[in-house]
Image (spheres, rainbow, N blue to C red):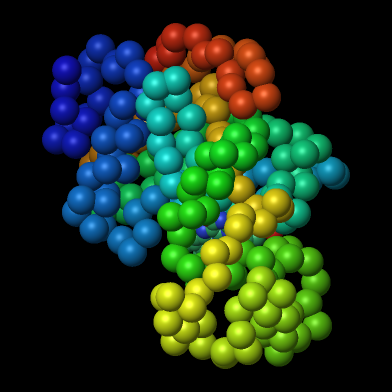
Amino acid sequence: MTDPCSATRLPTELPSNPMDWAKAWLDEAFEKGVQRNPHTMTAVTVDETGQPTGRMVLCKEFVVDPGYLVFYTNYKSDKVRHLNHNNKIALVFHWDSFGRQVRLEGEAIRSPADESDAYFATRDWASQLGAWGSDQSSPLESRSALIAQVGKRAMKLGVGAARNWKSIAVADRPVIPRPPHWGGIRVWPRRIELWIEGTDRIHDRARWDRSLVRSDDDTYTAGEWTGTRLQP
Ligand SMILES: Cc1cc2nc3c(=O)[nH]c(=O)nc-3n(C[C@H](O)[C@H](O)[C@H](O)COP(=O)(O)O)c2cc1C
């Protein structure tokens, strides 16, 4: 098999699983530290009027088989409100210094609660508190109102009035449970495109499609990928 990281072109016989390639590119971007957050991806959802809207999120898990990605967010945010209405989503990664782009389109569902609990427990303690502090995407009167809200909620969770949480001794930090409105979103792609920059704008592109059938609350049954080379 062609090594995805040394390949300057997609092989003549397209890879059978594009997720392998996308994951290898993501891993390499981390290993080589190409940018501060190499796992940043644009996530596009569609609101109730049909208006698409994009924002950056962090890919925290990339599972090649059976093939899904996970990001974490506030379930009361605009993006999740959109997904509750229409669970179709598009994701885009771009690693400029490698001249590589990965586009994914598919469906989003919430991660199982135990998976979100396990991930939340690994987060930095102050970030755990931060997840309680913000009603993401809700209007806000002022920055100081947010700081007051965050402090008030921290106190409810048993944290003293300290302004600087990081100054609280580890032994004095209460265990922070995962907020029920915060957790993972699993994205199951049914289409992936790999793009490699070429000279004179003669880039290399191919798109893969597969079937997806929802099998239960947390999972889809996915078919085999079929690849098609595309003009740049
Ligand atoms: C580099 C970067 C990474 C981000 N990662 C996340 C993330 O993983 N989850 C998240 O909810 N918001 C993340 N954000 C903030 C979102 O872009 C966005 O502002 C927020 O989720 C609210 O979006 P919404 O109102 O469309 O739901 C990130 C922003 C940047 C710039």
Residue 31 falls left or right of residue 162 = left
Residue at 70% in and 63% down: 136
Check the image and name the residue furthest to the front: 171
- Answer above or below: position of 209 versus 29: above
Residue at 16% in and 22% down: 2
Looking at this view, is 7 or 200 the one in front? 7
Residue 68 at x, y = what percent?
A: 48, 30
- Answer above or below: position of 173 versus 107: below
Quadrant of the snapshot with the C terminus: top left
Residue 195 at x, y = what percent?
A: 36, 35
Residue at 27% in and 49% down: 29
Residue 10 at x, y = what percent?
A: 25, 25
Q: Quadrant of residue 139?
A: bottom right
Residue 117 falls left or right of residue 124 = right
Residue at 41% in and 31% down: 63
Instruction: Confirm whether residue 98 shows in the render.
Output: no
Quadrant of the snapshot with the N terminus: top left
- Answer above or below: position of 87 versus 229: below
State ligand 1's quadrant: bottom right
